[in-house]
Image (cartoon, helix red, strand yellow):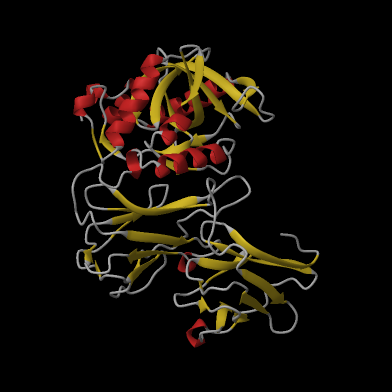
Amino acid sequence: MRIDDVPPVFRFIVRRFSLALILIASTALFAGAAEARPGPCYKPAAAVGCDVSNGKVTYVADGDTFYVDLDGDRSKAHIPVRVTGINAMEQSVYSRVASRRVGECHALEATARLERLLKRAKWRVRLTSLSPTARSGIRLRRSVSVKIKRRWIDLGQTLMREGHALWLPNPKENAWNADYARQGEYAASLRRGIWNPTYCGIGPNDTSQLQVTVNADQRFSGGEWVRVRNLDPVNTLPLGGWWLRDAALNRYTFPSWVVLPPGETLTVYVGEGVDTFTELFWNLPKTVFDNAGGTSMGDGAYLFDPQGDLRSYMTYPCVRACADPYAGAVKVTAKPSGREYVTVQNVAAFAIDLNGYRLESPPFGYAFPRGSVLQPGESMRVWITGDPAEDTALEKYWGETGAILNNGGDKVRISSFRGIVLDCYTYGSGTC
């Protein structure tokens, strides 16, 4: 990367590594934020208010970051801005000249699209945030809109709808979370951009169909895992060099020796352990996958091949065209007194495979293990305490060390990993 290709503020830091300049840049960030004025967050009729500022873009770094000279801040500083709610693929070489840029598959396309939109808007931007101090590192975290032909366009929404970025919801700057999630699922349904499994080139094993499921855990990394299933009935899939990631920058690369036989499943645990042919361990001390929540939070597990094609994924919660084949097919009840247990009954006329589903009594969750199949009319008892190693076909153990259900009132629901609720049982003061 040529030093002349980067914006002046970053150029000084690279040349001198000056702590003083970093402090000055941080002061400029807050000074720029202080110039913001109250205004609508998202749409003119939106009830939620935001801090609003305007400026002129001076440099586009990548598909979700640019530098701006803020209006009225009495400074010529080039302030870095992070587009909230999205995450473009990673770029490694930055330049004002498009031909000099280097990055992962889809990264340069996202940068070029952002740059084209900004150019059409004559480089003018409208920045909004719930908090004037919202940041991602040294970058201001903002929703960004531009006016093109008298029409306001939300850049994050556009990049999501066109398949240039993954959904990366933010718990604090959350006004845009739900909409961006819908735009992402829309792009995925049309296989646009990132969602096109052959965009980056032919192979490897393009004909192999895969399934990814992810179980997020609210409490500890040992309870989180991603399962990859080879749906090909004939061909073994070599996974060496493939990689898993979440919506942020957490990434796990499969060792060179990993293969997935036809019809088999491989589980990657986020926590610590010893690798085997069917179980791999990320060896991370903390959880990776964000939990679905009241501020439209969520996440996803994404499986990429070595050339950068997204070959399989699962996002959650479901926000568009949500349906489940087992809706109305199961009934849940619970016994909160004495030794606690939950009963799951198949009330349908067909067999139900509970792999990919879980019981929840927040903050506690239980993911059904593989082979948890209920025939019509059958019931399964899940004991809250006990060792899962002693599971039988119709008697399972949650694995908790003590009671989790409140005697005065609580709820237990069964849902898919994408958050589609099949049934919910309440007692006392509990509500679904």
- The answer to whether 173 is drawn above or below residue 96 in the figure is below
Q: State which quarter of the image contains the N terminus.
A: top left
Query: Is residue 362 at all visible to an observer of this figure?
Result: no
Q: Quadrant of residue 337?
A: bottom right
In front of the other: 4 or 260: 260
Q: Quadrant of residue 329?
A: bottom right
Percent coordinates x, y for residue 336 in the rendering: 73, 77
Percent coordinates x, y for residue 165 in the rendering: 39, 38
Tag count in the figure?
A: 0
Percent coordinates x, y for residue 288 in the rendering: 45, 56
> Who's the residue at 57% across and 37% down the image?
173
Query: Is residue 415 at all visible to an observer of this figure?
Result: yes
Q: State which quarter of the image contains the C terminus.
A: bottom right
In front of the other: 67 or 143: 143
- The answer to whether 303 is drawn above or below residue 399 in the figure is above
In front of the other: 235 or 388: 235
Percent coordinates x, y for residue 67 in the rendering: 39, 23
> Who's the residue at 51% across and 85% down the image?
393
- In the figure, is residue 104 to the left or right of 415? left
> Who's the residue at 62% across and 75% down the image?
344
> Who's the residue at 58% across and 45% down the image?
296
